[in-house]
Image (cartoon, rainbow, N blue to C red):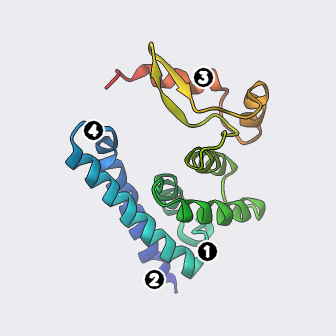
Amino acid sequence: MASELAELAGELTAMAVADHQAARQANSSDPAEQLAWRRLTAQHADRLNVIMDAYGWPTAELVGEDAARAAWLIAQHADRQLDVQRRALRLMEQAVADGLAVPRDLAFLRDRTLVNEGRKQVYGTQIAGVEDGSPIPWPCEDPERMDERRAEVGIPPFDEYVAQFSQFPAA
């Protein structure tokens, strides 16, 4: 079992590395690059679904911190497979409740899933675009309390969060 889990950890980590290397394709003006990104994230989401069938949520306790973080990234990017994203969210919610996953990561996945469902996000982690050099978040429920909710899960205030986006030139 230990070697099986080590192999799983390596697979998840390798998937995250491939995701990072291909991420620039997501917003490419080249349709072939966009399609490559979509195929990669779909393959990863399909594999994560199989992993969740076998193990539940791949926690750090099960596969190590790097691989658990990789599983979260794969779920985060499963935008076109909302069933997988929702399932990951449910399993991760239970893992957080059990103290086996990071509330911050859960907050990002919750917001991403809500946005993909066409609903308002909770923590303001998902950015719709940039207008006049300022990041614009997707709509957020109860925006006056957003920073309070962010603090509860270890996310910096919204103004600090979006300041990092201004460090990158517009594409």
Residue corresponding to mark 4: 28
In the image, is residue 133 above or below residue 100?
above
User: Mark 3 and mark 2: span between their CA atoms?
Assistant: 42 Å
Q: Residues within 10 Å of mark 2 (few under 14, many from 20)?
A: few
Who comes first in sequence, dot 3 or dot 2?
Answer: 2
| Amino acid type, callout 3 | Glu
In the image, is residue 57 above or below residue 74?
below
Residue corresponding to mark 2: 3
Residue corresponding to mark 3: 160
**Drawn side of residue 140 relative to residue 69, left or right:** right
Viewer-closest of 33 and 52: 33
Contact between labelled residues 1 and 4, with CB atoms less than 8 Å apart: no
In the image, is residue 135 above or below residue 75?
above
Nearest to the eye among marks 3 and 2: give it.
3
Who comes first in sequence, dot 2 or dot 4?
Answer: 2
The local secondary structure at tag 3 comes to helix
Residue corresponding to mark 1: 56
Q: Residue furthest top?
A: 132
Give residue 81's position: percent from left, percent from top.
Answer: 48, 61
